Image (spheres, helix red, strand yellow):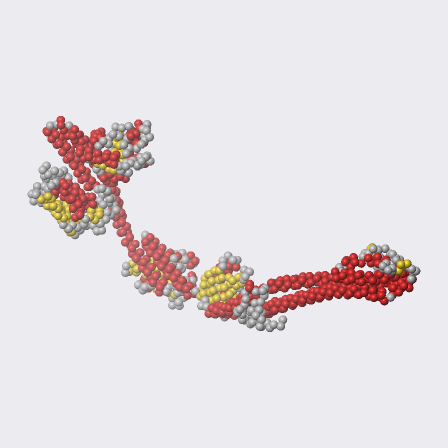
Amino acid sequence: MAVSLAQNRYVTRVSARGGAPAAGVREPGSRLTIRRVFQSALLLLLLLVLSLLLVADRVRETQAAITAAAEWRFDSHQAAAELRDSGNQLTLMARLYANTGDRRYLGYFNDILEIRNGTAPRPPGYGREYWDLVMAGVVAHPSGGVPQSYVERLRKLGFAAEEFDLLREAQAQSDDLVDLERRAFAAMEGRFPARDGSLTRAGPPDPAEARRLLTGPEYLAAKAKVMGPIAEFARRVDRRTEALSRQLAERQAGQVALALVLAALAALVLVAKYAYSARFVLEPVRVLERQARAMASGDYSTRNDVTGGAELAVLARAMNLASGAIEADVAARERVRTALAEKEERFRATFEQAAVGIAHVDPTGRWLRVNNKLCEIVGYSRDELLARTFQDITHPEDLEKDLGLLRRVLAGEISGYAMEKRYFRKDGAQVWIGLTVSLVRDAAGAPKYFISVVEDISGRKRAEEELARSNRALRMITAVNEALLRADTPTRLMQEACDIVVVTGGYAMAWIAVRGAGDGALEPAAFAVREDGGAGGPDSTRTARLAALPPVRRALLGGGPQVTRLDDAHADRELRDLGVRHGFAACASLPLRVGASVTGVLTLYSVRADAFDAGELRVLSEMAADIGIGLGAMREHAEVVRVNQELTQAQAEVRALNAGLEARVRERTAQLENAVKDLEGFSYSVSHDLRAPLRAIDNYSGFLLDDYADSLDAEGRRLLTVVRDNTGRMSRLIDDILTFSRAGRRELALVSLDMAGLFREVFEELRASAGERKVELTVEALPPACADAASMRQVAANLLSNAIKFTRDRPVGNITVRGGSNGPEVSYAVADNGAGFDPRYTGKLFGVFQRLHGREFEGTGIGLAIVKRVIDKHGGRVWAQGALDRGAEFHFTLPRREPCSTEGENQHVPG
Amino acid sequence: MCPDSLCQILLVEDNPEDAEVTIRALKKQNVANNLVWVKDGAEALDFLFCTGDYARRDQCPQPRVVLLDLRLPKLDGLEVLERMRADERTRLTPVVILTSSTQDQDKVRSYQKGANSFVSKPVKFEEFARVVSQLGMYWVLVNKPLEA
């Protein structure tokens, strides 16, 4: 293919890192695919070959036709020649007869005619030479065969009509010739033409005449006339058969040309296919190969822009995608590698600059990698450290625990651990560290190395120790204080104090000496020593001796706490000996004060030289002070015990008395509760049972008045009316008594009440009882009350109905309700201009059944009693003012309650 | 009095005078024709549940109203009420407590146990007659009972 790849739109060069394919690329679905091209080419070739085969078959057929035509032409020429030859042979036979007079030739003459006319059998191989061979005696005549006329043969050969016409013309022209021959034959037999033309005239045979007839110009002319159409016939046949042959030859030539064209086309298709392969397959493959090679050599930036040939384009895009993906992957790996490197760098920096020690340690304990801080903590150089194992520098007491944990990590039981332990620095000092260990395993899970993070916690440890010590001191002082409360004798207190100092305080030894009763010299009082101290049991003589030591004396004489370092050269010799013997390093003597005087000394020994620093001494002094207070308290204890005993006895008596009282109260309460129950039952009976007979009396009286009014005279009716009046009074009386009884028992539901509204409402309900009389109510501004609504309604009703009742004799009844607030109370007053009362009997107004008026004012005498009871129950007061005939004024107060509430225990009673 | 099965009013009252007064007042309103009077709580329940003496009562239809006194021999009124309300047949039967009591606690307990009405018997003849007639009028003539 000579087309430049660069210019071809289907196949383009490999471009270096072009990325996007060239614009104008056709989509794969819309163009020829390699497969389709190859299929099409194959199909085309197949068609061409088929056509070629068809054409070849035609050529073969045409060739057969040509051959047939040639044969036919040959036959036709032979037939034409036979006619001519048979004419010549007839002439020959006739002349031979005439010359020889041999009748055999005449027979031949006739045979020739008969064979030609089909009346005699035609010998096989009958032709020009036949008669020559017969005359030469080579062939016996006749030699069999099948009769076949000449014309019939011609017809079989398919001669045309005009050719037959020529033959017929020749036939017609042969008459003269035949006539001459007949005359010649007749002359040979002695017959001659008569006048009428028939050969009937007899004469002697005249062979000369016969010969003249057959060779004369007349015969030749006749013969020529015959031979003319025969020659024409031969020409015609020749022409016709030649035309057919030519036509066939031309056809064959056309077919051969077509075959050539087809072959050329097939070749062209093959060439085209090759060209396509070269352009659309081989070149892209080469491009892709180059790309693959580039990729193989690590260049992933190469992109192809192959677009021709759909399958290859797909492959090409896949290659591009692969390249892109690999390139991205490579880039990502590169980034990861860079990041890793950065991380590594950061790690290294972190590792080295960390504020804590970090190390990698192999599973046997050898340091693999250590950072500066670790070196700093342990005081070794890096190289020195790397030459050691951690076991080398770990405090033996901590090693076992560390190794144990390490084994558990290696066994996979735990993933890591943290502990506190001690290293020995290079200079021999020990350093407390916080260790955090985790294990790194390789991909197969085998341990690679430990990561140890080491933190110097010496400072914290010191603080902890300090804290522990102060805790210990505080525990000590607390324990001593508890002992103070617990101990009942000074001796026990001092012994407990010594024990506490040793057991809780951690001191090696402690003793207390107090002034004796006599000369005031110190006497041993308590002693304690740590079991491992080796100081032996209490030894009063030794203690006494120790008590004489200078620091003890100084303390006793009010010199405050005395601290002595036993390794101090200035220390007392005995003290130094003690220190050496028992390993004591320091001691302190503390005065025990009761009140203002020092009564004893507490001395403590410690194995630590620096045990008695200022802080410790402060705590110890406080403890000593507490012990002193305890000792002082002990002295007063006996007195206190005595007083307590008296007090206890008195309390017991009071309790006995109280118990008796409570029993009596319970008894009384039960009695009262029973009484209340009885009372309730009683009032219920009153309510129900007393009413029933009363109702019967009234109703039956009513029946009488209803049904027997006619039978009764006026007096009878009056008497019945009196009965009924009294049943009414009795009924009211029962109601009032019940109300009164209830008023005392009722549970109050306290709510905020609009008293003015209440009075007005009640007044409207009662107005009817005033009949047509004029009664006016004036309600001034009233403070709200916090009271039980039903009870207050009762109070209002009773006071207002009283006022209405006692103003009966007034032309206009005036009732005024006033109220006001007065400190913790609210007060209300109902005043009227009625009959009033004698103030002398004010005290009786509120009594049950107390009436200051006779029958002229109806009433049960319970109304005001109910009012008093209700107000009392509310915690208020009630009183009355008035004078006979000058009206009355009833006052009541209620406690102010804010906020107003029923306070739970009061049950609301409906109705 | 009426055949037991046609009872419209069941009067439960131990006091014969009260019963007479009540029946008399109802008669005046012509609503006492189908009234049955029983004298204690047990008999009332026998009637309502068709047991004991009333076992042969046809089909056991419920009265249109039960006038029930509280203080009764054997079973008191509140117990009767309780038993009625616990039984499906009488759960919705109207019950009017007709009692001498004016006590709040009686009223409260009656309503709590499902009384439809609470009436204190007035002492005065005229009032008693008026109250009872009104009761009869209302429950027998005005009020529409649940169809059985």
Residue displayed at 14% across by 29% down: A709
Q: In this view, does B18 lie to the left or right of A850?
A: right
| Frontmost residue, A428 versus A883 | A883
The answer to which quarter of the image holds residue B101 is top left
Residue A146 point in image, percent of width and height: 83, 55
With respect to residue A119, does A655 lie above or below?
Answer: above
Which quadrant holds the C terminus of chain A? top left
Residue B18 point in image, percent of width and height: 21, 31
Q: Is residue A67 left or right of residue B26?
A: right
With respect to residue A714, does A533 lie above or below?
Answer: below
The answer to which quarter of the image holds residue A664 is top left
Residue displayed at 8% across by 41% down: A809
Total count of labels: 0
Q: Can residue B18 be seen in this view?
A: no
Residue displayed at 18% across by 43% down: A794
| Frontmost residue, A257 versus A488 | A257
Residue displayed at 12% across by 40% down: A771
- Residue lying furthest right in this view? A204
With respect to residue A382, does A501 lie above or below?
Answer: above
Which quadrant holds the N terminus of chain A? bottom right
